[in-house]
Amino acid sequence: MQEPPEFRTYVAERSSRLLRTAYLLCRDWATAEDLVQTALTKAWLAWNRIGDDPDPYVYRILVNTHASWWRRRWHGEMPTDRLPDVAAETSYGIEDRDVLWTALHRLGKRERAAVVLRYFADLDHTTIAGILGCSPVTVRSQISRALAKLRVDPTLKGSVALVGLGV
């Protein structure tokens, strides 16, 4: 494919601005560079259809590509120069965690899956419904029933681990 001359001019004029925008989206220069390159590649493929003002189209590509990358990547780790000496402090101990896992395993399979997907995987009701093959209303009722069972579970009385579940 032949590169349109307007595209080369656009990239020369706008790439630094696109890079700053991409950095503000992802807060990492290397990822921002990849994001801009991907967005410009997608724009180049559609350049003949874009029209006179390519900025809105290219920025939409940039934002949508960032959103799809963000959904796919796990953002729980942050690299550091040195490793911590001790494990991170939590507001609850290992005993609380073990008691909570035991109580979760006493729930029904669907209730347990709904609670785990909602509170530990942080998924919304619609996504959970798609995973479990039911309606969002059913997911909400399963979570409600599961939390009610956890509230009255005698082994969890006074457990700090329930705070994360909003119980």
Image (spheres, rainbow, N blue to C red):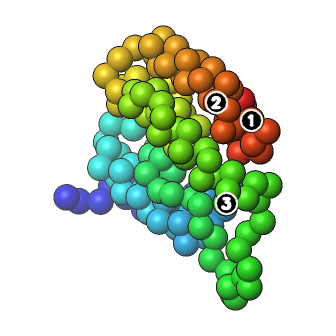
Q: Which mark is residue 31?
A: none
Q: Amino acid at mark 2?
A: Asp
Q: Which residue is mark 1?
A: 157
Q: Residue at x 69, y 38 (%)?
A: 156
Q: Amino acid at mark 3?
A: Ile
Q: Quadrant of the N terminus?
A: bottom left
Q: Nearer the viewer, mark 1 or mark 3?
A: 1
Q: Amino acid at mark 1?
A: Lys
Cα separation, mark 3 vs mark 2, equals 18 Å
Q: Which mark is residue 153?
A: 2
Label count reads 3
Q: If you read the primary sequence from the N terminus, does the residue marked by circle 3 or circle 2 appear first? A: 3
Q: Quadrant of the C terminus?
A: top right
- CB within 8 Å, label 1 to label 2: yes
Residue 6 in which image quadrant: bottom left
SS at mark 3? helix
Residue 88 % position (x, y) = 73, 69
Q: Which residue is mark 3?
A: 94
- CB within 8 Å, label 1 to label 3: no
Report whether residue 35 is seen.
yes
Q: Nearer the viewer, residue 116 or 137?
A: 116
Residue 142 % position (x, y) = 49, 19
Establish if 111 lies above or below 137.
below
Residue 86 % position (x, y) = 74, 80
SS at mark 1? loop
Cα separation, mark 1 vs mark 3, equals 16 Å
Q: Nearer the viewer, mark 3 or mark 2?
A: 2
Bin the neighbour count of mark 2 within 10 Å (Cα to Cα): few under 14, some 14-19, many 20 and up. Answer: few
In the drawing, does residue 135 fall left or right of residue 70? Answer: left
Residue 5 % position (x, y) = 37, 58
Q: Residue at x 68, y 81 (%)?
A: 80
Q: Nearer the viewer, residue 160 or 99?
A: 99
